[in-house]
Amino acid sequence: MNTSETPYLTTCPISCTAPLADTTLRLREGLLRRCSACGQLLSSASAARYSETMAQFDDSTFNITAGRAQKRRDAVAHRRLMRIAALLDKSPQDIRLCDVGCSRGQFVAAAIAAGFSAEGVEPAPQIAQAARDAGLPVRTGLLEDQQYADSSFDALTLFEVVEHLRAPLPLLAECRRVLKPGGILLISTGNAASWTTGAMGTRWDYFDMARDGGHISFFNLRSMALLAARAGFEVAGIDTARVKFHDRENTPRWRYAAGKLLAEALNLPARLAGRGHDMLAWLRKPAQ
Ligand SMILES: [Zn+2]
């Protein structure tokens, strides 16, 4: 094996010391491996493949939504913001929030519209500039680059960030530092122990680096709880939602429609069983 084929991930991203075991799930980048302690799934992608697929994020036209998709996204953002306010037991006007990895700043805009004092940080320079061009307070770079003072924020959000990271613990440590005691960190990522993953296996689009650039690390409820504990957070709740069996593009229409009906019937049971493919982890920095 030459260096260009060496996997970018060689140990569990949650810092388990247990060995990695091969799975039977073969992606284009090679077999997914599983941490034998926490069950985290790891891509075998090389560093070169990782960088190549991450480049999609720095295109100023990336992630533009409009019409119904934008309305849906705004509704999701609003629900999340109201839950953050409820967990903090504060009104939006008293909450300073930062969306880390904020892309074009859609969540920052939704938070400002809801009365929060909100800003964002985004490492991809062109996307960060697009957010500023839209009038949003977005800084370029990593959270770690910004040198915020201790206890700067009531709430931080990390949407679809942790699945890109070889080592998420240093970022979570920085989140903990800049959060006030009792502050909320909301993390969204995929759930690799979902009924969707069970049914779709390697066809689950979340595993597809060509489609979702840089996805290398796949969580389950246990590995998320372990990440939270190792970073010094309390878990206020971990929710999962949504089930699907087919991708619209590669499926005959009748089969897609039938699968969608079944998936919709399973949405509530999946939520109750923690088996949906969208995961939301509500973490809290201890008050003391
Ligand atoms: Zn692990």
Image (cartoon, helix red, strand yellow):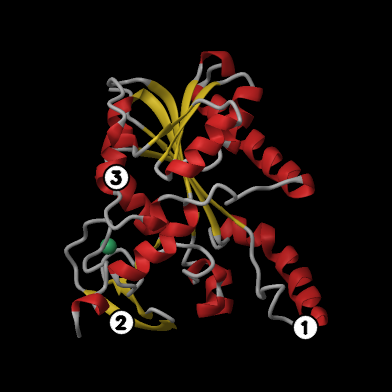
Name of the residue lying farthest toward the left: 17
- Determine whether the residue tagged by mark 1 lies in a helix, strand or loop: loop
**Residue 103 x, y percent position in the rendering:** 51, 43
Badge 1 residue CB within 8 Å of ligand 1: no
Give the residue type that dot 1 points to: Pro
Question: Is residue 214 visible to the viewer in this orientation of the structure?
Answer: no
Q: Nearer the viewer, residue 71 or 93?
A: 71
Find the distance from the CA under tag 1 to the CA under tag 2: 32 Å
Q: Which mark is residue 50?
A: none
**Residue 150 x, y percent position in the rendering:** 27, 21
Left or right: 222 as drawn, with respect to 254: left
- Compared to residue 162, the image places residue 5 above or below, namely below
Between disc 1 and disc 2, whose residue precedes?
A: 2
Give the residue type that dot 2 points to: Asp
Disc 3: CA contacts within 10 A as few (<14), some (14-19) or many (>=20):
few
Residue at 33%, 45% (x, y): give it.
Answer: 228
On the image, numbered disc 1 is attached to which residue? 252
Find the distance from the CA under tag 3 to the CA under tag 2: 26 Å
On the image, numbered disc 3 is attached to which residue? 229
Residue at 30%, 82% (x, y): give it.
Answer: 22
Q: Which label sits in the foreground, 1 or 3?
A: 1
Residue at 72%, 81% (x, y): give it.
Answer: 251
Give the residue type that dot 3 points to: Ala
Left or right: 146 as drawn, with respect to 24: left
- Quadrant containing the C terminus is top left
Question: Is residue 200 visible to the viewer in this orientation of the structure?
Answer: yes
- CB atoms at circles 1 and 3 under 8 Å apart? no
- Compared to residue 190, the image places residue 154 above or below, namely above
Disc 2: CA contacts within 10 A as few (<14), some (14-19) or many (>=20):
some
- CB atoms at circles 3 and 2 under 8 Å apart? no
Q: Quadrant of residue 140?
A: top left
- Determine whether the residue tagged by mark 3 lies in a helix, strand or loop: helix
